[in-house]
Amino acid sequence: MSSSPLLLVRPAELSDAAAVAALHRPEAAPTPRQVAFWREAIEFGEPLIHVADKGGQLVGFVGFDRSRDPKTKPTVGEVWALHVLPDEQGQGVGLALWDAAREGLEEEGCTVVTAWVQLREERALRFFELAGFKREMTTLRTALVGVERLEEIRLKRNVV
């Protein structure tokens, strides 16, 4: 009988920056610029980063803060990013990270939270919808990521 390591969700530390960068873009090794971006985010708390640590290995992270959308109230938070290793998806890691983000946003005085999700990311859309988010159909937009155009939509729910 084997036991799996316990999952610990905790605030990110500076030493987690390279692992967070790798989780954010798993298709290639992170560049020094990407690691520096996440190190700065962790250091200055913009966005706030929590990581999922399973037996000493980071298996996911969430970034959250106030909404970046123009003209939003200060009580609107946003999940800026939520990434979980493919082998860990469906194991409760994403939910544990979402719970940490929700609690952090509530502590910051946010009453509503949003998340921008690419339409092609069906698994992410399903995750957020199961977590109580609803699609805001009037927010559909095309975002330019590098040289690729991606369709995305904003989802929204109350924090509590």
Image (cartoon, grey):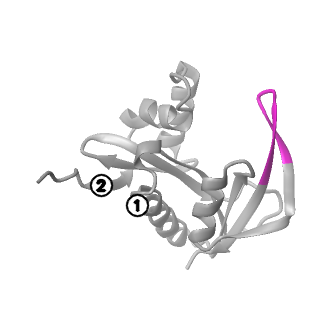
Q: Earlier in the sequence, mark 2 or mark 1?
A: 2
Residue 46, position as x, y percentages in the image: 58, 47
Which quadrant of the view contains residue 33? top right
Residue 131, position as x, y percentages in the image: 56, 70
Q: Badges 2 and 1: C-beta atoms under 8 Å apart? A: yes
Q: Residue furthest left?
A: 1
For the question of whether residue 78 can be seen, the reply is: yes
Query: What stretch of residues is rendered in magenta?
Result: 142-152
- Residue positioned 45% across, 51% down in the render: 89
Q: Residues within 10 Å of mark 1 (few under 14, many from 20)?
A: few
- Residue positioned 66% across, 54% down in the render: 122
Q: Amino acid at mark 1?
A: Gly
Q: Is residue 135 above or below residue 7?
A: below
- Residue positioned 24% across, 45% down in the render: 55
Number of marks drawn: 2
Disc marking residue 7: 2
Which quadrant of the view contains residue 156? bottom right
Q: Viewer-nearest of labels 2 and 1? A: 1
- Residue positioned 58% across, 70% down in the render: 130
- Is residue 102 found left or right of 116 in the rendered image? left
Q: Residue furthest bottom?
A: 160
Give the spatial CA distance, label 2 vs label 1.
9 Å
Give the residue at mark 1.
92
- Is residue 140 found left or right of 36 in the rendered image? right
Closest to the observer, 3 or 93 = 3
Magenta span main SS: strand
Q: Amino acid at mark 2?
A: Leu
Q: Which corner quadrant holds the C terminus?
A: bottom right
